[in-house]
Image (cartoon, rainbow, N blue to C red):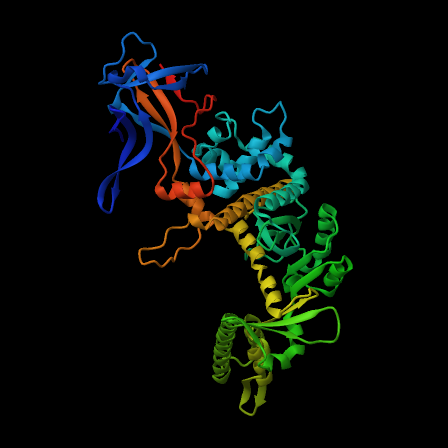
């Protein structure tokens, strides 16, 4: 690592600019990579245009210094002159900057700094609104526990400079106390975010997508009555569960969320959610979209009673009454692999839409074939065992048969199995039920929608139902990028606060997602062939792209024994510059807060 001079002639005078560079290995051989620019140092030939840098001593007092390279003769008897030993310049205190800077700017764009200022009080060493920002930005950038934030993540970031927090003030105790302060503001937070999404993106919340997921708790959590044994969508039935309900609009912007007991079934949550939404936002004619797991006649009646509308999936058992419609050829092709049709039923307010997807049909056919083959192989092995006389007890035969049927519930109803007594002994026989197999083949790839929404076409209703994928994408973001699972907190308020922080992380994530989507010009340029195969940047890729930006202290030793520390940000690449420009963000030239932890300084 060394300083490199750059010569430039301007206004008839020679100027020397300096940059800090390091040598890196590349496929084309060693190359010099610029870490940051220091600008112009002074020379004796231009003393009348001396450049100065403002630094602070340990007492926080400001001082102007004129920097000269040590080999250049500087003005005599000037106490403000500092001659830099260029060959001894070094870089210290490197910190992650880019992704944290982006998280902080998203936080401010949603005006969450203003919203959480209501948590602050004069007696706190650190404003609670800044601690809340640390929790949410961590959830966006590198999700971890409060202890991991204190010990590993926060000390490696430049958040102390960005948020103007003194060194050593963030610890797990302060983070836990902040969780307790944030939780009572849940309702106001949801209303604030709804308003900001409308102001920033024109988001509307007439159509609400509702879905549920579960997460699990590490430990017994004996003091939390909400965590119970229940169905685990994470395939962790060995752990206590918590159910999380999320409501988003058709673009994925969060509207509200709620937590339920871990053993709460999906279908029983709808009435609670309807009352909660009415209490927070009042009565309105909203359209609810949710899948068949939440559908019941009572839930649909509750929505109709409130003047609402719905577009929902239906259980497959209801599809049987439309068997004749499945056989007809009057389908409307709405996509290359998707066909829909509106079916007529008795006069009423509801409409049913039959849908069929080629990809889904192939998938379900492959699943049926795989499990049928496995079950028949198992039956053949049992048949050989019985025929060879190695299994003679009929009760044991029936138990073995029951195990086979239990292991293949997907196709058990398609195969009729009997143990037949013959003069030679018991014989195992089975055959495929032709009628049930034909019905299974007919319904594969098909599903049924039910709605009381008036629409111009079946295609319009199908497209609206497909927006439910936004809710599913929200859960994927919460579980993957934002790592909401597992829960390590043991008390109910802390668990709820953890979910709230994850909700805040998702608020930042979805804001970034729509900023990237709204600005397609940030994408890589078309190739030389003229064909643009670029895909939009995802929030995770944008964060990863900026994560290599760092802040660091450039230490400039001087000939009089002092060390000048300049806190600067590494030079962004062209791709990073493009992303920052299109997001409307500008990197600070240097971090010059007057706080001791982040000030440019000169130390004797």
Q: Tell me: 573 left or right of 100.
A: left
- Residue in the image at 28% along x and 27% along y: 17
Q: Tell me: 602 left or right of 112.
A: left
Q: Position of residue 309 (x, y in %)?
A: 71, 60
Q: Is residue 251 above or below residue 444?
A: above
Q: Is residue 67 above or below residue 572?
A: above
Q: Is residue 1 above or below residue 318?
A: above
Q: Nearer the viewer, residue 323 or 180?
A: 323
Q: Nearer the viewer, residue 387 or 111?
A: 111
Furthest-right residue in this view? 305
* Residue 320 visible in image: yes
Q: Is residue 58 above or below residue 389?
A: above
Q: Position of residue 59 (x, y in %)?
A: 45, 14
Furthest-bottom residue in this view? 423
Q: Which image quarter is the C terminus in?
A: top left
- Residue in the image at 29% along x and 19% along y: 42
* Residue 483 visible in image: no
Q: Count the marks: how many?
A: 0
Q: Which image quarter is the N terminus in?
A: top left
Furthest-top residue in this view? 77
Q: Quadrant of residue 355?
A: bottom right
- Residue in the image at 65% along x and 39% along y: 183
Q: Nearer the viewer, residue 418 or 562?
A: 562
Q: Quadrant of residue 545?
A: top left
Q: Position of residue 321 (x, y in %)?
A: 67, 78
Q: Position of residue 452 (x, y in %)?
A: 70, 65
């Amino acid at each position: 690592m060394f300083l490199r001079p750059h010569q430039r002639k301007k206004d008839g005078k020679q100027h020397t600019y300096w940059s800090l560079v390091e040598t890196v290995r590349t496929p084309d051989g060693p190359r010099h990579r610029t870490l940051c620019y220091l600008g112009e140092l002074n020379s004796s030939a231009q003393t009348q245009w001396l450049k100065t840098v403002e630094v602070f001593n340990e007492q926080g007092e400001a001082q102007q210094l004129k920097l000269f390279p040590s080999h250049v003769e500087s003005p005599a008897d000037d106490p403000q002159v500092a001659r830099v030993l260029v060959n001894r310049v070094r870089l210290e205190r490197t910190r992650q900057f880019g992704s944290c800077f982006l998280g902080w700017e998203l936080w401010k764009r949603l005006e969450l700094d203003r919203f959480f200022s209501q948590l602050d009080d004069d007696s706190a060493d650190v404003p609670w609104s800044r601690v809340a920002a640390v929790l949410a930005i961590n959830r966006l950038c590198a999700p971890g526990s409060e202890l991991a934030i204190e010990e590993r993540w926060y000390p490696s970031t430049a958040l102390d400079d960005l948020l103007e927090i003194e060194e050593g003030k963030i610890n797990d105790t302060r983070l836990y106390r902040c969780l307790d302060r944030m939780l009572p503001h849940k309702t106001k937070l949801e209303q604030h975010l709804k308003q900001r999404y409308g102001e920033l993106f024109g988001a509307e919340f007439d159509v609400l997508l509702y879905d549920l997921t579960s997460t699990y708790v590490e430990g017994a959590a004996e003091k939390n009555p909400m965590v119970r044994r229940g169905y685990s969508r994470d395939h962790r039935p060995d752990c206590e569960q918590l159910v999380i309900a999320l409501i988003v609009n058709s673009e994925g912007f969060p509207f509200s969320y709620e937590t339920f007991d871990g053993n709460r079934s999906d279908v029983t949550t709808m009435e609670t959610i309807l009352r909660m939404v009415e209490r927070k936002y009042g009565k309105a004619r909203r359209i609810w979209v949710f899948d068949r797991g939440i559908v019941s006649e009572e839930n649909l009646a509750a929505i109709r009673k409130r003047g609402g509308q719905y577009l929902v999936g239906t259980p497959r058992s209801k599809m049987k009454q439309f068997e004749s419609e499945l056989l007809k050829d009057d389908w409307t092709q709405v996509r290359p692999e998707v066909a829909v049709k509106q079916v007529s039923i008795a006069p009423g307010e509801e409409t049913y839409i039959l849908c069929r997807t080629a990809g889904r049909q192939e998938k379900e056919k492959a699943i049926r074939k795989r499990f049928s083959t496995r079950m028949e192989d198992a039956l053949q092995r049992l048949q050989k065992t019985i025929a060879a006389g190695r299994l003679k007890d009929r009760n044991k035969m029936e138990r073995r048969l029951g195990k086979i049927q239990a292991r293949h519930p997907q196709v058990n109803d398609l195969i009729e199995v009997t143990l037949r007594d013959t003069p030679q002994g018991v014989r195992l026989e089975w055959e495929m039920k032709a009628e049930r197999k034909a019905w299974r083949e007919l319904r594969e790839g098909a599903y049924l929608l039910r709605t009381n929404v008036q629409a111009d076409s079946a295609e319009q209703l199908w497209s609206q139902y497909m927006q439910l994928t936004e809710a599913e994408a929200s859960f994927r973001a919460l579980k993957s990028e934002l790592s909401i699972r597992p829960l390590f907190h043991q008390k109910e308020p802390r668990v709820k606060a953890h979910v709230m922080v994850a909700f805040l992380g998702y608020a930042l994530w979805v804001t970034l997602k729509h900023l990237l989507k709204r600005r397609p010009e940030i994408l890589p340029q078309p190739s030389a062939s003229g064909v643009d195969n670029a895909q939009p940047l995802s929030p995770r890729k944008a964060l990863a792209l900026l994560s290599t930006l760092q802040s660091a202290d450039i230490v400039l030793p001087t000939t009089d024994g002092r060390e000048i520390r300049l806190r600067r940000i590494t030079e962004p690449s062209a791709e990073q510059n493009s992303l920052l420009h299109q997001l409307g963000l500008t990197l600070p030239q240097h971090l010059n807060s007057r706080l001791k932890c982040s000030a440019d300084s000169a130390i004797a």
